[in-house]
Amino acid sequence: MALPYFFEPTVAKSKALFELSEETSKHCIQVLRMRSGELLQLTNGRGGLYTASIAHEDKRHCTVTIESELQTPAPQKKISIAISLLKNTSRFEWFLEKATEIGITEIMPVICTRTEHARFRFDRMQQILIAAMLQSQQSWLPVLHEPVKLPALMKEAAQEQKFIAHCEENPKTPLHTIIPGASVLILIGPEGDFTPQEIELAQEYLFIPVTLGNTRLRTETAGIVAGTLLTIG
């Protein structure tokens, strides 16, 4: 049976004793009713996986002893997805959850010409990533950025490979035929797609136009399809 798994960003092997956050303490002692000597696992979201035992029971300030550490190597491929915000926040949150589960390393919400976006609550979105990382038993948390306007993102993009997925009837390369390198960024547009001007600007910044298939996908679905093709490619 898998040990209970929690996110503690400051956990480190050098701390023989470590005090859990109030939230984790409450979950361990009050919800799971764990007791002294019982084991749990902690991750710092940067590859560290720590096995610990409860040293002192307290629903607010539970203390654990770090028993062992395993450092998981960073993903060999850094897959970044820049995706338009959505008016339906729950659909954007679904994308964040699934992108984390499949191993996307960086998520950049963007504001495009046709973006109809609601308020972006960074803390809530970050918590969704953390929950998805724990649920999928990973120890690398995707990097989440604050929303940025599309032209600014294009200008600053420094990835080894850069792609833009769009639905215009222009020549495009099927994404599934591309072998991704060590650092990849793909742009996913809003419902209604990128404007022709945005597509032209992307090509000026050396983004390669790609297609994700023969059907027109919702924004969040396109993001997951693109991420899956790039992570398994």
Image (spheres, rainbow, N blue to C red):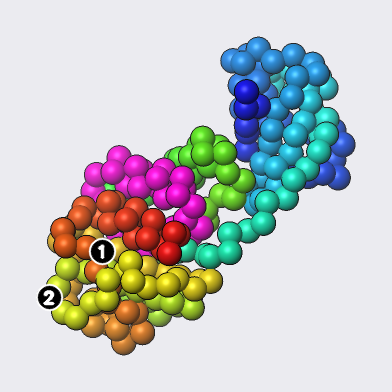
- The amino acid type found where label 2 is placed reads Glu
Residue 152, quarter of the rendered image: bottom left
**Alpha carbon of mark 1 to alpha carbon of mark 2: how far?**
13 Å
The local secondary structure at tag 1 comes to: loop
The residue that mark 2 highlights is 169
Residue at the (34%, 53%) spot, across then down = 224
Residue 189, image x and y in percent?
26, 63
Left of 26 or right of it: where is 108? left
Residue 104, image x and y in percent?
47, 56
Residue 6, quarter of the rendered image: top right
The residue that mark 1 highlights is 212
The local secondary structure at tag 2 comes to: loop
- The amino acid type found where label 1 is placed reads Leu
Please report the bounds of the magenta region as a residue range: 81-109
Residue at the (45%, 71%) spot, across then down = 180
Residue 207, quarter of the rendered image: bottom left
Residue 134 vertical position relative to residue 172 in the rendered view, above or below: above
Residue 43, image x and y in percent?
66, 41
Of tags 1 and 2, the one toward the viewer is 1
63, 213: nearer the viewer: 213
